[in-house]
């Protein structure tokens, strides 16, 4: 005994209007089709739900009992379907994103602001994280996606390339290297170097391969966040290297950037999501938007 949605909607329409003609108009069906749905419902239930006469119709005792139940079921279903439609058509939703602290305070706020102009009903929750924490947040389900430098391949993660850009030297105004339009790593290594903790320096040296002794980086200071390194450079405590996407923050500190050559070292950043897991419509749309946003050129 499984009434169909069409049968229940037909019954509710008749019960609300008290008239087969009005109910048929409300449902956009013929009166004979509506009568057929009511008969099918009664056959399915094995009981009459509407008493008909030439003058009026009335709900039977069974009909009176079923009306609030069917009505509540249909209302709940309609609300659920409307909610699904709102999400699918990007009228509402939430996207949770994890990103390294530097990216979270430079590139992403501008991207999120541009996104909200298109989709004001979709909230983007930004979790600024340590670089090594991003993929863990993705795997735990804490966030929908994360942005981080290239990592070893993992079957638990899907990776989409977002950025591939070279390191730039960051120096304070008045520095002896200010007049140079581009710098070598060997030139930079001649000054106190401010590095990030962890594998930052080791990865740089590994990427350099066989380099002359005078190009070897020997950190004078190691800090947890690039924002701290930039503040120290601004205070005249040394030099550092940074990604071009953070140029706005570098310039706010009044610092100068120079291309780094011999060799040119790059970092690739990926958007990571959980493998074999579908993103929500909002999250999928945001990932596509972010890739397009970055592909059109980084804001300065």
Image (cartoon, helix red, strand yellow):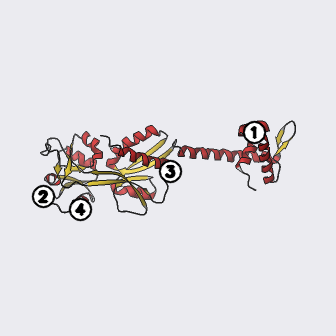
Q: How far is mark 1 from mark 4, CA to CA? A: 75 Å
**Residue at the disc numbered 2:** 214
Q: Is 119 above or below relative to 243? A: above
Tell which circle, 4 or 2, labels the residue nearer the N-terminal end: 4
Q: Quadrant of the N terminus?
A: bottom right
Q: Please state if 280 lies on the left or on the right of 211 as rendered.
A: right
Q: Return the x and y of residue 119 as percentages of the image width and height.
A: 47, 40
Foreground mark, 1 or 2, reads 1
Q: Which mark is residue 154?
A: none
Q: Nearer the viewer, residue 93 or 27?
A: 27
Q: Residues within 10 Å of mark 2 (few under 14, many from 20)?
A: few
Q: Secondary structure at mark 3?
A: loop
Residues packed near mark 3 inside 10 Å, few (<14), some (14 to 19) or many (20 plus): some
Work out how far the residue at label 4 is from the one at label 2, CA to CA, in angstroms: 16 Å
Q: In the depicted view, which residue is nearer to us: 43 or 145?
A: 43
Q: Which residue is mark 3?
A: 280
Residue 248: image location, x then y, percent? 28, 41
Q: Secondary structure at mark 2?
A: helix
Q: Which residue is mark 4?
A: 206
Element at badge 4? helix
Q: Residue at the spot x=27%, y=60% of the render? A: 199
Of label 3 and label 1, which has the lower sequence position? 1
User: Does the residue at mark 1 contact the one at mark 4 (Cβ under 8 Å)?
Assistant: no
Question: Disc 3 versus disc 2: distance between alpha carbons?
Answer: 51 Å
Whether residue 18 is visible, yes or no, is: no
Q: Position of residue 137 (x, y in %)?
A: 41, 56
Q: In whole angstroms, how far apart are the C-alphas of marks 4 and 3?
A: 38 Å
Please identify the residue farthest to the right as the structure is shown. Answer: 54
Reading the image, the residue beneath label 1 is 24
Provide residue 159's location: percent of width, then percent of height. 40, 57
Which of pointers 1 and 2 lies earlier in the amino acid sequence? 1
Lower sequence index among marks 4 and 3: 4
């Amino acid at each position: 005994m499984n009434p169909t949605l069409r049968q229940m909607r037909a019954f509710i329409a008749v019960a609300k209007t008290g008239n087969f003609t009005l109910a048929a108009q409300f449902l956009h069906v013929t009166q004979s089709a509506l009568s057929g749905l009511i008969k099918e419902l009664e056959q399915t239930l094995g009981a009459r739900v509407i008493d008909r006469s030439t003058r009026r119709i009335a709900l039977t005792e069974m009909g009176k009992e079923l009306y609030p139940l069917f009505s509540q079921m249909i209302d709940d279903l309609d609300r659920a379907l409307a909610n699904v439609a709102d999400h699918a058509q990007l009228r509402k939703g939430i996207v949770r994103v994890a990103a390294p602290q530097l990216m979270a305070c430079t590139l992403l706020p501008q991207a999120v602001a541009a996104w909200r102009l298109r989709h004001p009903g979709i909230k983007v929750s930004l979790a600024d994280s340590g670089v090594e924490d991003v993929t863990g947040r993705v795997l735990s389900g804490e966030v929908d996606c994360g942005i981080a430098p290239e990592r070893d391949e993992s079957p638990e993660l899907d990776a989409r390339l977002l950025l591939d850009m070279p390191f730039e030297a960051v120096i304070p105004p008045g520095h002896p290297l200010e007049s140079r339009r581009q710098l070598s790593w060997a030139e930079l290594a001649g000054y106190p170097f401010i590095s990030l903790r962890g594998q930052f320096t080791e990865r740089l040296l590994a990427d350099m391969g066989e380099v002359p002794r005078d190009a070897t980086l020997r950190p004078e200071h190691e800090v947890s966040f690039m924002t701290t390194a930039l503040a120290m450079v601004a205070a005249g405590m040394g030099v550092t290297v940074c990604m071009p996407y953070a140029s706005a923050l570098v310039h706010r500190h009044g610092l100068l950037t120079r291309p780094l050559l011999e060799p040119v070292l790059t970092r690739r950043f990926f958007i990571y999501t959980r493998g074999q897991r579908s993103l929500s419509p909002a999250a999928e749309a945001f990932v596509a938007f972010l890739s397009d946003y970055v592909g059109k050129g980084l804001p300065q």
